[in-house]
Amino acid sequence: MQNPPPGPPPGPPPSGYPQQPYQPAASGIDKRTGAFLSYLLGWVTGLIMLFVGKADPDVKFHAAQSIVLFGGLTVIEIVLRIVWSYVGVFGIIYWLVGLFSFVIWIVVLVKAWTGAGARFQVPLVGGVVTPYAEQLADSVN
């Protein structure tokens, strides 16, 4: 049996490629995909990714931040929907919260994808959301 000829000698990667080899997260997905999926369907995928990506602290953080942010916004929207049925003026506030939720959702999806899964604070409400997200992420083993 013949041995195949040796390949080209190792050298620097071609331009446009990262210098470090690709390393998936311990859960089998990379940080970028895990962070993106944590926000994709709001708190629902955040809850899923909290347990699927629990071996990667950054993915776990994004999942916890998604749960705290979008779970909190969902509770606010439910309360406003109930109050709106009794007092019509809350309809504008309900609409503004819904618009804010949509805009923040787009922002966090873009930041999670372009930031390669690195941690970030949510714009405008990050100071409130981040401490609770840290606590939730640390509580899941």
Image (spheres, grey):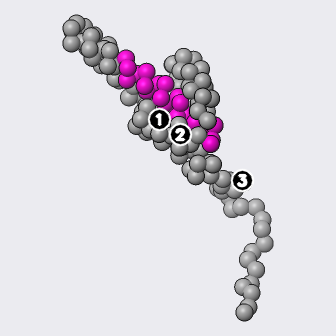
Asked whether residue 30 is in view, the answer is: no
- The total of numbered circles placed on residues is 3
Asked whether residue 79 is in view, the answer is: yes
The residue carrying mark 2 is: 51
Name the residue rendered at 73%, 91% in the picture.
Answer: 2
Label 3 sits on a secondary structure element that is loop
Q: Quadrant of residue 91?
A: top left
The residue carrying mark 1 is: 47
* Closer to us: 8 or 134: 134
Q: Disc 1 marks which amino acid?
A: Leu
The magenta stretch spans which residues? Answer: 55-76
Alpha-carbon span between mark 2 and mark 3: 28 Å
Packing grade of label 1 (10 A; few <14, some 14-19, many >=20) is many
Residue 42 position, x and y percent, is 42, 33
Q: Are marks 2 and 3 in contact (CB under 8 Å)?
A: no
Name the residue rendered at 34%, 23% in the picture.
Answer: 98
Residue 68's place in the image compared with 16, above or below, is above
Label 1 sits on a secondary structure element that is helix
Alpha-carbon span between mark 1 and mark 3: 31 Å
Q: Quadrant of residue 103?
A: top left
Q: Considering the image in quadrants, where does the N terminus appear?
A: bottom right
The residue carrying mark 3 is: 20
Residue 104's place in the image compared with 52, above or below, is above
Name the residue rendered at 56%, 42% in the picture.
Answer: 53
